[in-house]
Amino acid sequence: MEKPIYLDYNATTPIDSEVIDAMTPFIKEHFGNPSSSHYYGQITKKAVDKARKQVANFLNCSTNEIIFTSGGTESNNFAIKGTAFALIKKGNHIITSKIEHPSVLETCKFLEAKGFEITYMPVNETGLVNIIDVERAIKPSTILITIMHSNNETGSIQPIEQISELVKKHDIVFHTDAVQSAGKIPINTDKLGVDLLSIAGHKIYAPKGIGALYIKQGIVLEKLIHGAGQEGKRRAGTENVLEIVGLGMACEIALRDFDKNVSNMKLTRDRLYNKLREKISYIRLNCDLENCLPNTLNISIKDINSNQLIDKIKNHLAVSSGAACHSGMTEVSYVLKALNVLDEWAKGTLRFSTGKMTTIDEIDNAADIIINNF
């Protein structure tokens, strides 16, 4: 049986062949501990240093502003908890949005239980926060604002640069979760004006289990992991050299091939949308495509159950639903709830996400599969 067409690149990506090639020597030959001063350790230390430079080039920052983590979830946890506990004597108020990734929302809930005050900003029907609302939410006790760069479900892109200008008027740390943005829209830490920024390897054709956190020079975080002095004494533990090399190479490729990849993702995304709306009458876009990740298409088809549709086509097409099914009950995504999408639409939500490897033939076949089965 042929493998299903894969249109779920926002969930994860395959590892790029060039990334595999870069990693292979560190599986077969180079095993040294980067903290060791001898020959074996120096080879892996140089590899880690090279990867750090590749990531820094990708994000347009200094190498000493990059630390490696186990992925986006750890990066978000470190940014938020690290700031909260470092600045607890200054204040206890944090601002975020209702549509953040669970690694942000659950971290904020944890901090609430520890006595911090969290303001969860609403979003409009296209998933954007209102900058005026953010400004009104700021208090003398506000120490951190954490707003995602782009949403993993709808693809909506937040006005991070404008929020940054607002934050500069106050002495507040600004973090953005850019995990879903990497490789799809430009990420320039200087232009964005953020203090902290998270990325994850498996969203940009690197392995799972590796990520990075940009920490602007001068920002102090309370450590999450205690031990030896790795990562500039900010994250203890022997470095995951193999996957750090993979992340570095993936960042180099993403920067090198950015225009080509974005063009293909947008071309295939738009083709899929146009084909679907030609044949399906009751279809709703859950994002403004002019302010959306170029690869992401989140649609709702009225009065269908997307989980049942996905189950029906799963041997032919891999996509995500906008609703979870628990014990026969359909639970609509909290992101769609925040967008005030009515249940008769929300329960029929599908998220398609194209990748740099997606072909026109795959898109045409995927459209036919949806149209013939919904």
Image (cartoon, rainbow, N blue to C red):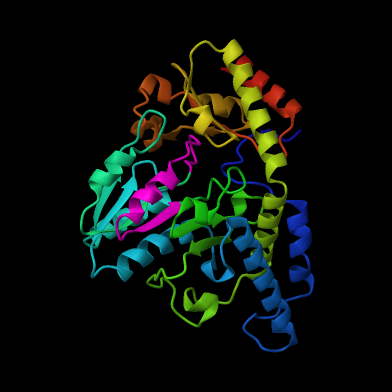
Q: Is residue 357 left or right of residue 94?
A: right
Residue 306 position in % (x across, y down): 50, 25
**Residue at 24% over, 67% down:** 90
Q: Would you say residue 175 sits in the magenta stretch?
A: yes
Q: Position of residue 10 (x, y in %)?
A: 57, 41
Q: Which residue does the image show at 70% across and 72% down from the upper left?
A: 47
- Position in image of residue 365 (x %, y %): 71, 23
Q: As displayed, is residue 13 above or below residue 373?
A: below
Corner quadrant of residue 359: top right
Residue nearest the viewer, comparing 41 with 62: 62
Q: Residue at x 41, y 68 (%)?
A: 219
Position of residue 369 relative to residue 169, above or below, is above
In the depicted structure, whether residue 107 falls above or below residue 97: below
Say if the magenta span includes residue 211. Answer: no
Which residues are drawn in magenta? 150-176
Q: Reply above or below: 83 against 278.
A: below
For the C terminus, the image quarter is: top right
Which residue shows up at 65% across the image and 72% down it?
48
Is 283 left, or right, of 80 in this rendering? right
